[in-house]
Image (cartoon, rainbow, N blue to C red):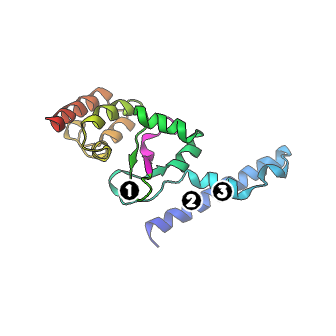
Amino acid sequence: MSDLMDRKEQLYAALHAQIEQKFADAAEAGVDADVFADPAAIAAKMVSALPTSNVYDQLGGPFYDTAGLTTWLGLSKQALAKRVKVGSVIACQLDDYRGTWVFPTWQFTDDRTVLAGLSDVWRILCPAADDPWMALFWLRARHPALGGAAPVDWLIAGGDLATVVAEARNDAERWTA
């Protein structure tokens, strides 16, 4: 079985266990069955938290699409678009016929906020980059000044933001020279 199919089976098992617990808790608390009256809508919300797939996944992903991210964050498309415009959320547009926006999952912490300092680095890189994909790939590339770590991994591990900002400024200056 492939790694992907193994992960799918693991996800099924984890979901099954959590759903069983949720229903046991609901039964114990006397929750009305109507709370679960629309299983398709509940399933759609659950699946919206799964990353999407596209050709850039190996380099910069995985990604949420707009529908998945707005559902996961609990905000409107307009609120998300505003965050994209001001650079507080990392987003890139695909070259598909719809111009689909994708949002790397790794930018978010478990409490559904953007990793501290990441937006600052994004706002340094984007204006200097040929396109946002260049800035996104920079965040996932290994950097000698970070001990061979990618800036995102460095920050997730608790590395110093100032070092990443300095690297971003140096490369942004080189890109515009």
**Nearest to the observer: residue 98 or residue 9:** 98
Q: Which residue corresponds to the image point at 25% horizontal and 33% vertical from the top-left? A: 168
Q: Quadrant of the rendered structure where residue 57 is?
A: bottom left
On the question of residue 124 being in view, the answer is yes
Query: At x 86% / y 46%, what residue is drawn?
Result: 30
Res 135 → quadrant? top left
The earlier-in-sequence mark between 2 and 1 is 2
Where residue 163 sits in the image (x, y, percent)? Answer: 26, 29
Quadrant assignment for the C terminus: top left
Whether residue 115 is visible, yes or no, is no
**Residue 45 location (% of width, % of height):** 63, 51
Q: Residue furthest front?
A: 97
Mark 2: amino acid: Leu
Residue tagged 1: 57
Task: List the residue tagged with mark 2.
Answer: 11
Does 41 sit left or right of 63 as displayed?
Answer: right
Q: Is residue 173 magenta?
A: no
Mark 3: amino acid:
Ala
Residue interval drawn in magenta: 101-114
Residue receiving disc 3: 43
Instruction: Tell me the amino acid under the disc marked 1.
Output: Asp
Alpha-carbon span between mark 2 and mark 1? 19 Å
Q: Is residue 110 magenta?
A: yes
Nearest the eye: 100 or 48: 100
Q: Earlier in the sequence, mark 3 or mark 1?
A: 3
Q: Give me the C-alpha separation between circle 3 and circle 2.
A: 14 Å
Query: Is the residue under label 1 in contact with that under label 3 (CB below 8 Å)?
Result: no
- Picture coordinates of residue 156, whole percent (x, y): 39, 38
Relative horizontal placement of residue 85, taking residue 130 as reference (left or right): right
Q: Secondary structure at mark 2?
A: helix
Q: Are marks 3 and 2 in contact (CB under 8 Å)?
A: no
- Residue for point 60% across, 62% down: 12
